Image (tube, rainbow, N blue to C red):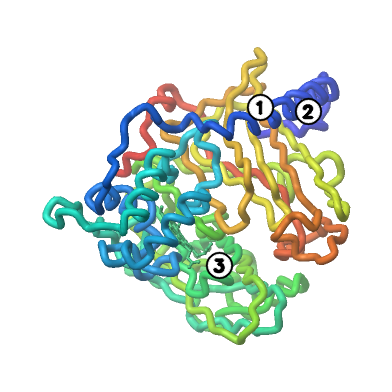
Amino acid sequence: MFKSKYSITSLRGTKQSHILLYISFVISLAFMFVSCQNSSNDNSQTTLKTNPTFEDIAPIIYKNCTPCHRAGESGPFELMTYTDAKKNANKIKFVTQVRYMPPWPADPNYTHFIGERTLTSNEIELIKRWVDSGAPQGDEAKTPKAPSLYYGSSLGKPDTVIWFNRAIPIEGNGDDHFFIVKIPMKLAKDTFVRYFEFVPDQRKLAHHINGHLINYEAGNKKEVQSGLSYALDEYKDYKNVYAQLNILNDDGTFPTLTPNTVYYLPGFTPPAYPKEIGGYQVNKTSAIFLKSIHYGPSNADVLDSSHINVFYGSKPKRPIRETQLGTFGVSKIEPEFILQANQVQTFHTQATLDADISLLSVNPHMHLLGKTFWAFAIKQNGDTIPLIKINKWDFRWQYYYTYQHPIKISAGTTIHVYGTFDNTANNPFNPNRPPKQVVQGESVKSMRTTQEMFQFIFSYLPYQNGDEQMDLSKHN
Ligand code: HEC
């Protein structure tokens, strides 16, 4: 889909525009700093209740906090009832005052996404007043009830659940761990799946999961159950590892892969799309093949028994495609991706489209040294399409951000991505004390938490007339 920036066709004028862009980047950074002070995201004119009760607070909490702060999800305590909120009132006041919760790294003044979770200044002030006046309950009968969300899923009740064949042992030696996992599936007949939702068991350690779907053609595979269910990913002799996992066809050839069907990053929930978009055909004999599952360092030996929620659907009409810029992607990072010790550096990557697309979702990815992330597109006529801006990168919250309506990006438009990395001691997440030079590495090994990545992943459809009107929040 992309012309590489270095292909003959797209070499025109890149140097100059690059410099201009950099200047505008610096200017808008300065502007951003000013405009952060009075976030335009709220309506500060309206008068706020002086003595709010839980009647006023419950809707804010149930919408913005409960999806994670409930049993089976990542939040460390539940926020389902008045009692839960009252018990944690001071903490709630604190984390909302400093805008630590709800976690939503994307700047809502730049672009909006489905499921956006941000509080207005008014809501934050209302919470403060409520807590300061002793967190009163108010009229219980008038207080809305917590939403009934399905246990163990952000998408609702799955049609079926598939588990790791065997729990994966993670050694408590303070190292990163990489595995390859096979999860065989034996279905009554060929079917279609809308989503695979990976549910990590060791939420604090699960760093990154990238899985493919293997469909065995009829007659190519007698049985998929035998063989190892996981193997250490040691970056060598893959053919032998695949044989041990028994994922090859019976004649030793590679089966058909549908890439990136199962995905997970901290904070990630699979983007849900309207019925006619996305989905996978799954053959009777098939398997989920987690090409890489990466656990961050642990101090204790633990077992991970993660599972995958499966949601059936109808035959996919418009398959989703995915591309990435930057690390392992279609475009080169400039300057060379070397993060010098004690420096804050900005890197850039760009690619020009050679076909019209409808952009659905974007996923910025960096590790612990990430500081800010900014992606936008520049049309051939010079107009800018804002895509996403993250003013304060947080490694723990890496969402797939889905636009309300697909964004049409025409052929000839260039996508630009800027990432700033803070490799100084001021960065509280810097894993090296004192800071030391960090690079990307040459293989999947660079996915180690302590190495860096600079990636802009996005999902799209080939453009069709009227895509801009499609409402991506309508799932049925
Ligand atoms: C996307 C999921 C998510 C949402 C939404 C969310 N939280 Fe959290 N929250 C977490 C996770 C995970 C942690 C623990 C990790 C951390 O502290 O970063 C946490 C930590 C906290 C803590 C700190 C707990 C402690 O003792 O250190 C508080 C307080 C809190 N959340 C309150 C809230 C409130 C209030 C909201 C809504 C305004 C909210 N959270 C929304 C996931 C979420």
What separation in Å lies between label 3 and label 2 (alpha carbons)?
41 Å
Badge 1 marks a residue whose secondary structure is helix
- Few, some or many C-alpha atoms within 10 Å of disc 3 (few <14, some 14-19, many ≥20)? many
Q: Residue 347: x percent and y percent? A: 78, 40
Residue for point 52% across, 34% down: 359
The extreme top residue here reads 381
* Number of numbered discs overlaid on the protein picture: 3
Q: Nearer the viewer, mark 1 or mark 2?
A: 1
The reply to whether residue 313 is in sight is: no
Q: Which residue is mark 2?
A: 22
Point out which mark residue 289 bears.
Answer: 3
The response on whether ligand 1 sits within 8 Å of label 1 is: no
- Horizontal placement of 466 versus 151: left or right? right
The extreme left residue here reads 141
The response on whether ligand 1 sits within 8 Å of label 3 is: no
Q: For the C terminus, which image quadrant?
A: top left
Q: Residue 286: x percent and y percent? A: 47, 67
Amino acid on which disc 2 is placed? Tyr
The reply to whether residue 309 is in sight is: yes
Q: Which residue is mark 1?
A: 31
- Few, some or many C-alpha atoms within 10 Å of disc 2 (few <14, some 14-19, many ≥20)? some
Q: Residue 49: x percent and y percent? A: 28, 40
Badge 3 marks a residue whose secondary structure is strand
Q: For the N terminus, which image quadrant?
A: top right
Q: Nearer the viewer, residue 179 or 382?
A: 382
Amino acid on which disc 1 is placed? Phe
Q: Residue 229: x percent and y percent? A: 55, 80
Q: Nearer the viewer, residue 313 or 143?
A: 143
- Horizontal placement of 222 versus 339: left or right? left
Residue for point 72% across, 48% down: 454
